[in-house]
Structures are given as structure tokens and as C-alpha cells.
Image (cartoon, rainbow, N blue to C red):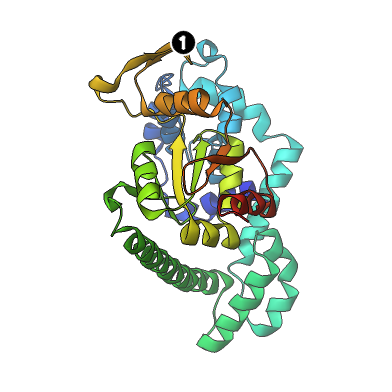
Amino acid sequence: MNRFFISLLVCCLIAPLCRAQHSKECEQLLSRKLNIESIDAITEDLLQLKNCGLDSFDVAMLCKPSMLGPLLSDLEHIPTYGDFFKKVEPMLIMPEYVSMKQNVFALAAVLDKDATAENWDKDTRPLLELGYTAEDLATAKEFMLNKHYEHPTYRSVFFEYTSVRKAIEEKLAQQKRDSVATALDAIKTTFAPYCDISQLKSTDYNTVAFTNYEAGMQCAKKMHRPVLIFFNAFNSVNSRKMVKAVLADAAVKSMLEQNYVLIDLLCDDREPLPKSKEHFSKALNMQIATIGLANAELELATYKSEYVPFFVVLNSVGKKVATIGYTNLPKEMMTVLMKGIGK
């Protein structure tokens, strides 16, 4: 069963916690006008219509944006929630819809069964349909056996198992974040004797880079290191792909951290330039008022490119020795980086 049905199941399972509406309250709700300015407000009101002609499954279905949007496409003909209910009522009695609802509630009922070792294998199929993976079932079963529950249900086992697993995953994630932070501090220590490390920023590919061209170039000159300039854009799909597939590669990261000064320049950075640095660009034929446009101007005027991602390799004396555009192969980036160190 896909995630869509899982979300419906969650709504169905918490339904007993919801207070039933009195008939007078229902009458007031159904006569209320739709707030056509906000789908969120409509969704909130629909949640109040449980037991006013809709049940928890119906509400879960109708609250899905993919279904709610088309239903509200002709708002002038459904001014109240009562009118809205009349519009959706034919759908609620369609055989396919009724069958789907019965199937969901039948699957949800499985969670209240006894979760014995004997039942576990018998109930594998419906539990898989609920969205659990085979690995989830195996580890949850082992968790249950180690806990020595008395008369557990699948619901109680999965609730505690999920809570414990979430705590473990968060602990591991924090350990990873701490490890990355320690590694980045070590890299900054290498730069500290030569450069203003306040200009070094942590990247989303777990290394550090200058985001100011002049500061990066000055640092490289003092350290006698080659430079990799990364012209990219936050909203560039290919730039984000290269970050994950290439720049985060262990060999590429190691090469950059040990041998290079990395300058990461966003060409769609909307942060305003200081007024004193605003100017008209002949290269772009426009007024330059943001950091992103200044980076784009630098790329075009100095390195004759207007595309992202685009990488420029400068050797230790500042001479351009290589460029590369989009690639998803770390070895191609390594070939270019080797030119920067004279190999």
C-alpha cells in the first residue's frame, strides 16, 4: 500500500478520539459559508464534519489537495458546506469508493490483533499492505520478542518500536552532525594562519568554501594553492545533482580540502549588494544590485560563460588551466582537478 493510503489509515485510526458532533452543531457547520480564500481553512472545517454525514475516511480523502482542488474549482455553485456535501455525496456511494474504504478499515483492524510470534508470519501480507517493509516487520518482531510483552497488539508493538527507532536514528544523526562539524573546524584551522576564516562558509556537501570571490582569491595567493571556482545556482537542478554526485564524493572532497581553495558562487543569490557596489553591467546589459547578479557578471565577463554549473580551475599562480560544466562522474572532476596541481 502506498503512502497515500498510509496517511488515510492514520486519520482512520485516530477517529475514535474525535468527539461526535451533535445534530445542532452539524446543522450550523453545514450552513457555514466556504472560505474561498484559503484551502487550509476549508480543510480545517472539513475536519469538523466527521459524523455530520462524513466519517474519518471521507474527511481524509477530501482533505487531500489533489481531490479538494478540483472539487472547489467551481466555487460559486457550492457556497456552503452543505452544498459541498451534496456535490461529493455521489462519490461516497460509488462501489469502488465503498470497496476501498472497507479495505482500509479491514487493514486497520489488523493492528488490534494479538501480535504473537505465531500470528506474526500469518499476518505478514496485510502488514506489508499497511506500508511496513519486510525489514520493518523482522526487526519489530525481534524487538517484541526481546521486550517480553504480555498480550501485545501490533499497534502497541509498532508504536513503541517506532519511538525507540526514531530516538536511535536521531542519536546517530546528531553524532554524524557533530563529526562533520569537527571535521570542518579542522579544515578551518588549516586556513587560519593565512586567511580570514570568518569568510569561510560550510557547504551543503560537507566542506568549506569562500562565497566571496576576492576573499577566496586572496587566501589562495597567500597559501600558494590552486583555486576551484564553482559558479552555481540554488535553483539549478544540475547544480544540485553535481553537489550530491560529484562534490560530495570522498575522493573529490579530499582533493579539494588538501590541495585547493574552493570558491562557491551562487548566481541566483538575492542578497542585496551594498549601495556603493551597485553598478550597470555592460556584460549583462543590466543594473547589478544583488550578489547573485554580481557573480553572474563575473562568470561572463571574466570566464566567458553564462551557464551553471560551471567550474573554473586556476593554478597556484592564478592562471586558468581548465574548465568543466555539468558531469555526474567524479572521475571527470578529478581529471580536471589534477590539472590544477600540475599533474
The three-letter amino acid code for the residue at tag 1 is Asn
Q: In this view, does 185 lie above or below 32?
A: below
> Disc 1 marks which residue?
285
Give how far across and how far down residue 123 sits, in percent: 71, 71
Where does the N terminus fall, quadrant-wise? Answer: bottom right
**Residue 296 image point, x, y percent:** 47, 26
Label 1 CA crowd tier, 10 Å (few <14, some 14–19, many 20+): few
User: Which residue corresponds to the image point at 59% horizontal and 76% vertical from the top-left?
Assistant: 140
Residue 78 at x, y percent in the picture: 52, 16
Mark count: 1
User: Looking at the picture, does residue 312 appear above or below residue 286?
Assistant: below
Residue 216 visible in this rendered orientation of the protein: yes
Residue sticking out furthest to the front: 317
Compare residues 53 and 331 and report the one nearer the observer: 331
Displayed quadrant of residue 73: top right
**Residue 58 seen from this side:** no
Q: Is mark 1 on a helix, strand or loop?
A: loop
Residue 180 percent across, percent down from the top left: 42, 64
Residue occupying image coordinates x 51% and y 86%: 147
What quarter of the picture does the C terminus occupy?
A: bottom right
Which of the pair 331/76 is nearer the observer?
Answer: 331
Which residue is at a point 75% across and 75% down the rendered structure image?
A: 122
Residue 270 vertical position relative to residue 19 in the rendered view, above or below: above
Quick check: 298 left or right of 193?
right
**Residue 36 falls in image quadrant:** top left
Considering only vertical position in the picture, is 155 above or below 253? below
